[in-house]
Amino acid sequence: MKKLDDFRFVLGKNELVPIMIGGMGVNISTAELALETARLGGVGHISDAMLPTVTDRLYKTRFVKQKLQKYKYNIDNADKSVVQFDLGEVAEATRLHVTKTMDAKQGDGLIFINCMEKLTMNSPRETLKVRLESAMDFGIDGITLSAGMHLGSFDLIKDHPRFRDVNLGIIVSSARALKLFLKKTAKLNRFPDFVVVEGPLAGGHLGFGMDWAKYNLPDIVADVMNLLKDSELDIPVIPAGGIFTGSDAVNYMEMGAAAVQVATRFTIAREAGLPEKVQQEYIKATEDEIEVNTISPTGYPMRMLSNSPAIGSGIRPNCESFGYLLDSKGNCSYVTSYNREVEKHLKKISVMDKTCLCTHMRKFNCWTCGHYTYRLKDTTNKLDDGTYQIPTAEHIFQDYQFSVEQGILLPKLEVA
Ligand SMILES: Cc1cc2nc3c(=O)[nH]c(=O)nc-3n(C[C@H](O)[C@H](O)[C@H](O)COP(=O)(O)O)c2cc1C
């Protein structure tokens, strides 16, 4: 009976435990979680989603206040096109987070940063270039491109001195998307170093439509492997989405995967960024409380708990402070929906079709999660007071690494 630890993830010169913890914005995949993963020999992710607000909290910068100060005059204006990020501040926020994380790294593992293309920040190309280049400037081990096709992303950074040696990968949900991406990177003679294939059971945004249930991860992984074989490309393939046990992971390794990417089980780790109250909500959740909806202004379906405070909230848009989802023309579909409700002159505004993702992700009020969140209660102990024990990242990591036969080891109960 094989266990995940019988395999190794060979990435360039590195030999890693084949466990990659996926990026989870906004600072759910914390530096602490990534550092613990690297210490244990795997690949951890930090996320660059909303970094200026994250660094305000972590390192006492004042980026949000400064931005609001500058654009306060525009709050009542429906046109948000003037509300631009200061690129120097975006670089500085990235520098702070990446440097602080990489300086603390121990062990043989690696730390990557997750960069979502859909974080368009009112100036998609310029801001993405600064985010990617700053992460490389300050020593990140690798970048995982996500939430978008990223057809122009390699081109944006092709002149960076680390372009050819930093680990660059992409998350795709179909062989078709990968084919388009490879066509672009072939022109630069720079192929990705790894490909994460994310299926429909993942957390966060989905690379599928509302017909996501029609798809399944093993088929997509097989399609991607065939495409790479036909193209004579030897690129590590990393399945993600719904891999809940070490045995699930072994099944993919036996198919030829190089590693697996997991996230949901780590949402309840002590080192993850979710407040413990929210972690208890995740653990308590039942299957019928997990929904895929279309309230994210990105246009991608998103999976979340149906009791997320973000759903139906009519909070005033906060683009002058945040504005991470404003597109290249300064539009965000939440702003449009909010203004439509304001026109109705109701006493209490509730917006059902979209949510203010910036505000709610920042406050941990959008409880995005993977499909198998309802199984989290089987991974830990219920305590006498009715709450659940919060396991360490090390415990979860080693459960993936060493468990067999669909087993899940419960964390040791701590004696007070
Ligand atoms: C709470 C949460 C937040 C996530 N946020 C992001 C994100 O910001 N960017 C991204 O590319 N993927 C995100 N994901 C997807 C994960 O990185 C990962 O690929 C996927 O969830 C793996 O499936 P699993 O959760 O079933 O293990 C998120 C997942 C979760 C559970």
Image (cartoon, rainbow, N blue to C red):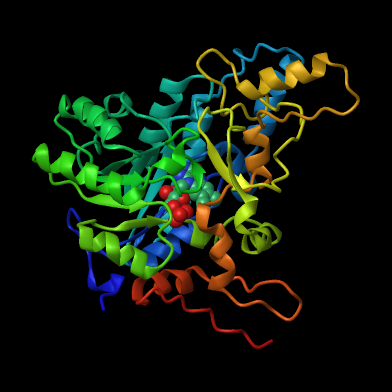
Residue 20 spot, x, y in % from top left: 36, 57
Q: Quadrant of the N terminus?
A: bottom left
| Residue at (61, 26) in percent of width and height | 323
Query: Hey, which quadrant is residue 77 in on the image?
Result: top right
Depth check, front residue: 377 or 59:
377
Query: Hey, which quadrant is residue 114 in on the image?
Result: top left
Direction bottom: furthest residue: 415
Depth check, front residue: 184 or 167:
184
Residue 122 spot, x, y in % from top left: 53, 20
Q: Quadrant of the C terminus?
A: bottom right
Residue 106 visible in the picture: no
Depth check, front residue: 91 or 148:
148
User: How many marks do you count on the picture?
Assistant: 0
Residue 100 spot, x, y in % from top left: 47, 52
Query: Hey, which quadrant is residue 267 in on the image?
Result: bottom right
| Residue at (53, 45) in percent of width and height | 25
